[in-house]
């Protein structure tokens, strides 16, 4: 009888340990991203969710999009605080102005991780090396134009990823004396519709545009659609993302887009979430920001490119 009791106690302890191991993460997590309308955020959110559920399969996860509105995202963070979230994963719509909301979350004892875009005050950030991404995308334009031509940059919202890409692009153009930048301050809203609208205006203003850099793939695709509408085929276009839509365009051959600096949103988000989960357990990361390198996807290597929609 005594032996049976010991066995039963051991079994109960093992079950408790197993249960604890399965729930090695927060029970409630909030995720807020720039927009749920951009396909980039599908694998980004999935990477976050997979890392959270690996730590705690029963975690309650709330995912919302801020539509690139600061007030909306700040309110979403406040809602997460009120709901008792233990962790917030953030894709900030404004890396500086989001700071007060981040501080409110941290004051409530919530760990805050940022992915794709830096966020002032966040515990940790993992993002693409966006300066590098902009630089290689625009260097490819320069190479294809043989170092000479009139180009435009379609900018975007005031978020670090977009600003860093434009910085990298401008650096590449500045090192090419034969390149003339016609415009670099128009906001394409990081969307296909925004890129289309901005490109329409640029096509009306400038009779010749040799190259276009879109700060992300939706912007580049919108610019391509506008050029088609205007029957303007003198230009080539690059973007940043390596998105499924851009891959399809490259494979179709019916596009002015010639390349995109690729990202891995799933890997980026999973890593950011892993680090944030570690912070909850008192594990301080070696550095508070990690940058992931990017590679150029073109029609020449697109068939071997492992994209966002690859099986994980």
Image (cartoon, helix red, strand yellow):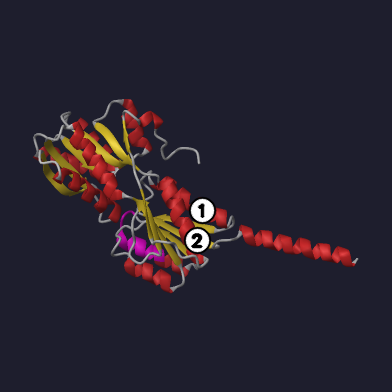
Which quadrant holds residue 25?
A: bottom right
Residue at the bottom extreme, as displayed: 107
Contact? badges 1 and 2 (CB < 8 Å): yes
Residue identifier under label 1:
51
**On residue 208, which mark appears?**
none
Indicate whether 2 appears above or below 269: below
Q: Is residue 84 left or right of residue 292?
A: right
Residue identifier under label 2:
277
Q: Is residue 30 visible?
A: yes
73 inside magenta stretch? yes
Which region shows up in magenta?
67-77
Q: Is residue 196 visible?
A: no
Earlier residue among tags 1 and 2: 1
Q: Quadrant of the N terminus?
A: bottom right
Indicate whether 104 appears above or below 16: below
Residue shown at 20%/32% (left/top)?
Answer: 144
Measuring from the top left, give residue 250's x and y in whole percent.
31, 30
Question: Which secondary structure, mark 1?
Answer: helix
């Amino acid at each position: 009888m005594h032996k049976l009791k010991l066995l039963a106690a051991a079994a109960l302890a093992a079950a408790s340990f197993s249960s604890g191991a399965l729930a090695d993460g927060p029970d409630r997590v909030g995720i807020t991203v720039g927009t749920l309308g951009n396909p980039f955020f599908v694998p980004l959110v999935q990477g976050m969710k997979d890392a959270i559920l690996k730590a705690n399969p029963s975690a309650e996860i709330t995912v919302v999009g801020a539509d690139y509105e600061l007030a909306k995202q700040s309110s979403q963070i406040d809602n997460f605080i009120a709901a008792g979230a233990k962790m917030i994963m953030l894709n900030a719509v404004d890396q500086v102005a989001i700071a007060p909301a981040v501080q409110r979350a941290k004051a409530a004892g919530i760990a805050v991780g940022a992915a794709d875009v830096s966020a002032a005050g966040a515990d940790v950030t993992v993002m693409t090396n966006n300066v590098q991404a902009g630089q290689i995308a625009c260097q490819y334009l320069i190479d294809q134009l043989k170092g000479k031509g009139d180009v435009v940059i379609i900018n975007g919202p005031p978020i670090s990823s977009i600003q860093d890409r434009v910085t990298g692009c401008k650096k590449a153009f500045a090192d090419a004396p034969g390149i003339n930048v016609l415009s670099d301050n128009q906001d394409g809203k990081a969307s296909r519709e925004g890129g289309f609208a901005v490109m329409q205006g640029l096509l009306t203003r400038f009779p010749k545009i040799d190259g276009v850099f879109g700060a992300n793939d939706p912007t580049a695709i919108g610019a391509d659609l506008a050029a088609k509408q205007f029957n303007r085929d003198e230009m080539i276009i690059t973007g940043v993302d390596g998105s499924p839509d851009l891959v399809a365009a490259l494979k179709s051959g019916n596009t002015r887009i010639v390349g995109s600096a690729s990202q891995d949103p799933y890997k980026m988000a999973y890593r950011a979430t892993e680090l944030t989960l570690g912070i909850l357990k008192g594990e301080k990361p070696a550095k508070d920001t990690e940058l992931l390198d990017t590679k150029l996807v073109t029609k020449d290597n697109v068939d071997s490119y492992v994209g966002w929609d690859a099986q994980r």
